[in-house]
Image (cartoon, rainbow, N blue to C red):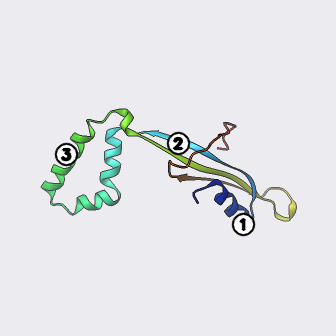
Amino acid sequence: MNTPEKVGSLLSAAGFTLGRVWLEPLEYQWDVPRFTCLRTRFGATKRELDTLDPRAREACLDRIEARMSCLNSKDLVCRATAICAMAATYPGGGAMSYQFGLCSSVPSRVRASSHSRGARPW
């Protein structure tokens, strides 16, 4: 699901009445300790580090820390775009029984040409 159109189609096909679908820019400012902790204690990098003997692992972590400390705050900004959607079900045409909210991150190359800055749904 990498476009608003696909997300809207999926929700409609699932029986939801589509409210709106929009792109929302995301930006997160990392700091070195948090980023390094996340990258070295979880996922593929952790699994690779776990294959090293303890001395080699510590040396590698020391090199990572030294190299990361040279970065400035601009180097640690993550920018992406999220596809957000609001939809609801109305069984038998009556009152709304369920409201659905969705945010799905998409590659940063997906950009909105115009962006509504209305009230956030959450």
Residue 25 occupies quadrant = top right
Q: CA distance from mark 3 to mark 2?
A: 30 Å
Q: Compare residues 94 and 15 and report the one nearer the observer.
A: 15
Q: Is 6 left, or right, of 25 in this rendering?
A: right
Residue 97 occupies quadrant = bottom right
Tag 1, which secondary structure? helix
Q: Compare residues 66 and 112 and report the one nearer the observer.
A: 112
Q: Which mark is residue 63?
A: 3
Residue at 57 percent of width and 45 percent of height: 111
In which quadrant is the N terminus drawn?
A: bottom right
User: What amino acid is found at the position of numbered circle 1 in the picture?
Assistant: Ala
Residue at 32 percent of width and 47 percent of height: 37
Q: Which mark is residue 13?
A: 1
Q: Earlier in the sequence, mark 1 or mark 3?
A: 1
Instruction: Measuring from the top left, give residue 76's x and y in whole percent.
Output: 38, 39
Q: CA distance from mark 1 to mark 3?
A: 51 Å
Q: Is 29 left, or right, of 60 in this rendering?
A: right
